[in-house]
Amino acid sequence: MVKTILTIVFVIIGLILTVIVLMQESKSAGLTGTIGGMADTYWGKNKGRSMEGALEKGTKILAILFLVLAVVLNCKFL
């Protein structure tokens, strides 16, 4: 019973994690943007308060939960 519930949560977290990663902006212009002075903009200074900052935090939290659940589901005691 517990393993089934954890598996369902694991799949849901995997789907949400996929959507959040796809919603994030590309970092391909990161170095050139920093050299060009884009890091000094309002969004560069307040990145943690923007939607991009929230997506990054959500990605980190969900990735950790995903890995922990993967380890727990792989244990023999369930």
Image (cartoon, rainbow, N blue to C red):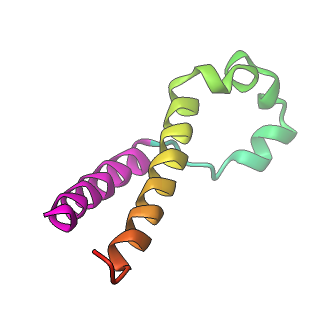
Q: Position of residue 55 (x, y in %)?
A: 49, 37
Q: Position of residue 30 (x, y in %)?
A: 72, 46
* Chief SS of the magenta region: helix
* Res 11 quadrant in image: bottom left
* Res 52 quadrant in image: top right
Q: Going 55% across and 41% down the picture, which residue do you hit?
A: 56
Describe residue 35's horizontal placement relative to residue 2 as left or right.
right
Q: Going 46% across and 63% down the picture, which residue do you hit?
A: 68
Q: Nearer the viewer, residue 9 or 54?
A: 9
Label total for image: 0
Describe residue 68's horizontal placement relative to residue 46 as left or right.
left
Q: Position of residue 49 (x, y in %)?
A: 60, 20
Given the current orientation, which residue lies at the most extreme top position? 42
In the picture shown, does residue 49 fall above or below 25?
A: above
Given the current orientation, which residue lies at the most extreme front position? 77
Q: Nearer the viewer, residue 15 or 65?
A: 65
Q: Going 38% across and 63% down the picture, which residue do you hit?
A: 69
Q: Is residue 49 magenta?
A: no
Quarter that holds the C terminus: bottom left
Q: Position of residue 66 (x, y in %)?
A: 41, 60
Q: Nearer the viewer, residue 34 or 10?
A: 10
Q: Going 38% across and 79% down the picture, which residue do you hit?
A: 75
In the picture shown, does residue 58 fall above or below 72?
A: above
Q: Nearer the viewer, residue 64 or 20?
A: 64
Image: magenta residue range: 1-23
Quarter that holds the N terminus: bottom left
Q: Is residue 11 magenta?
A: yes
